[in-house]
Image: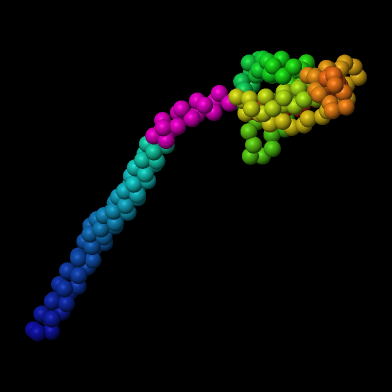
Amino acid sequence: MKPAINIKIFIFVGILAMLFAGLFALAIYPFFSEIEKNSLELVIQKDRLVQLEEEAEALKRGEALYNSQTENIAKIDTLLVNADLPTEFMAFIEDSAAKSGVKIEISSAFSPRPEPGTWSGIGFQVSVNGPFPNCLRFIDRLEASPYLIDILNFNVNSSSGGRYVAEQTETTSSPQPLPAVIKNVDAIVLLKAFIR
């Protein structure tokens, strides 16, 4: 009888082992694999949440920086010329010429090719006629303008007509002061005004 009991015990243990294996394969393994999948998803969600919080914080810092620099941005905006209607800038050029004692003609506005990494601008060709010192004074006024500009080229030629009598100067050889005669020059100024 002993061998029959041993066989029944082995069969019972075998059936029990197969039931446990089946239970593990059908219930426990999917349960644990679902837990593993959910925990990986939870880690991904936490990483995403941390990333979103960092982005939100960076956005708040950027907004605070923008708000603190609003005054500077407004100042920079006043330095730039309105590209659609540059009449205010052209009026400034004409006013500077009048104050400098030269005659000007703004003959063209062009768009210079922007180089990579530079701001775009609008170009002006200004023909200037007057005494050379006054032309230099005009250039100084342009350089000190409230606008952000770049003088690309300044060509000066002797004028075909007109002379300017400057203030009288004294010479050691003559007891009478003599007028200093300064010939007018023609100049062409190419300038680029940076635009909004």
Which segment did they paint magenta? 63-79
The quadrant of the picture occupied by the C terminus is: top right
Residue at 72% over, 25% down:
137
Quadrant of res 30 = bottom left
On whether residue 78 falls in the magenta region, the answer is: yes
Residue at 42% over, 35% down:
65
Quadrant of res 175 = top right
Classify residue 6 as left or right of residue 95: left
Quadrant of res 82 = top right
Most distant residue in the right direction? 160
Residue at 37% over, 36% down:
60
SS majority, magenta: helix
Classify residue 31 as left or right of residue 189: left
Above/below status of 13 relative to 134: below
Residue 27 seen in this snapshot: yes
Give residue 40's position: percent from left, percent from top.
Answer: 32, 54
Above/below status of 12 relative to 168: below
Residue at 60% over, 24% down:
146
For the residue pair 12 and 21, the one nearer the viewer reads as 21
On whether residue 68 falls in the magenta region, the answer is: yes
The quadrant of the picture occupied by the N terminus is: bottom left
Above/below status of 140 relative to 37: above
